[in-house]
Image: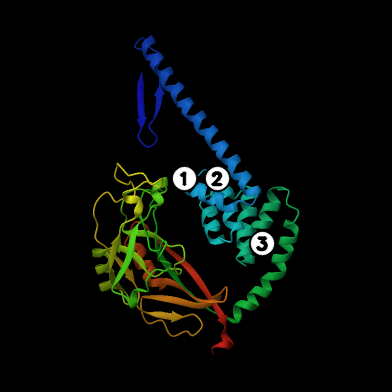
Amino acid sequence: MQAHRGYEHEVWCVYVLFDSNVTVKMINEIKSKLKYILYLVINWYAMNKSLIEQINNWNDNRKYSKVIETVEKLPQSEWSYDIKGILARAYINTRKCDKAIDLLLSEKITGSNDALWNYRIGFAYYNNKDYKNALQYFQRCTELGDIGDKQIDYLIKECIQEIPKREDWEKTRNSITAYNLSGKSEFDGDFSYVTIRVTWKGKEYVEIPTQCQKTQVMRSHDSVYGVVGSKVGDFIGHYGENSSKQEGVFTHRHIAELLTKRFTGLKFNELIWLENPLEKKLSTGKPRIKKAKWLPEKEVDLVHLYSDEYIDINNQTTIKTDFFNVIRMEEIKKKKCRSTWFMCTKETAQEINNMNFSCLYIKKSTIWGGQKDEHN
């Protein structure tokens, strides 16, 4: 008998060579292991099926925030193809279409031949007024079969009509296309990297780094629910409910020193670490006995890396540095707000990519502003 163990999934793959060396005891051991594996598979399937039924029911009853809250508490390694699709639906219905698109594209190989997947990603692009991409996915959806939605023919006609209008609109708008940088809690499919929080109750907005010497942060409590873990990447993902789009990134001091010497337009500030209430207490209020599992596996010296160069999308100046911020002033619910994107040039993005940092996300993005004749 030969046995080989796969370390990734702790599953025993047993190959039996029927010869005189195989005993009844050995066969019984194999049966016992196979029964246990079968039990795990059936149990996982039953739980997954039950969860899918529940969150589908919430979606049908427009309880989208409940869907998002429940799924985001799960380890991302447990997000199956179906669960991702349902979560994307909830994102779309709460106008978080960029998140829906990124999530759906993570299953593009499987989804490209699924009518419902094509419909969902098409609808996300449609809500983002990206009618060209929406049209190709809607048309692919109809090629694959009927999903029971009568409005898809209308959506296709709408996209065909809106594409030339959108092209004319884009010709009259200010825009900047560059490369946006952000930290994340995943690297090569491993979702066990720490994150930090930059806003919380009592602190609604992240500090503008050019106006202060230190940035207040605390350990994220997201991994209390198993979303992330205790590894520390080269860059660290961060979250803030009401923060602007992005005021720089968080990284190790030695990386910040390397990048500020190598590229123009970069600086870094110190951090002030505040204690997350959940570090000593559970979410129930009871004292925490064991160390909170989102705390890093080792102490690291982190800083806030940012650019002190700003370009107003509606009053543009020439880009003179490798790194810069694109800002856009807008009015939301009669309140003036400033959105910020931490960006770099194409050449800089290519050079950064070649450094092979972990947990760093670089994405080509176009930021739109107001009409050109308003400011020129």
Tag 1: amino acid: Leu
Q: Distance between the residues labelled 1 and 3?
A: 33 Å
Q: In the rendered structure, find residue 307 and report the number of the disc placed on it.
A: none
Give the structural element (helix, strand or loop) at label 1.
loop
- In this rendering, the label closer to the viewer, 3 or 2: 2
In the picture of the structure, the residue carrying the numbered disc 1 is: 74
In the picture of the structure, the residue carrying the numbered disc 2 is: 83
- Relative to 343, 44 lies left or right: right
Tag 2: amino acid: Ile
Against 30, is 243 above or below? below
Q: Distance between the residues labelled 3 and 2?
A: 25 Å
Q: Where is residue 27 in the image (x, y as percent from the top left)?
A: 40, 14
Tell me the residue at 37%/37% (across/down).
Answer: 8
Q: Position of residue 40 (x, y in %)?
A: 46, 29
Tell me the residue at 37%/14% (across/down).
Answer: 26
Tag 3: amino acid: Leu
Marks 3 and 2: CB-CB under 8 Å? no
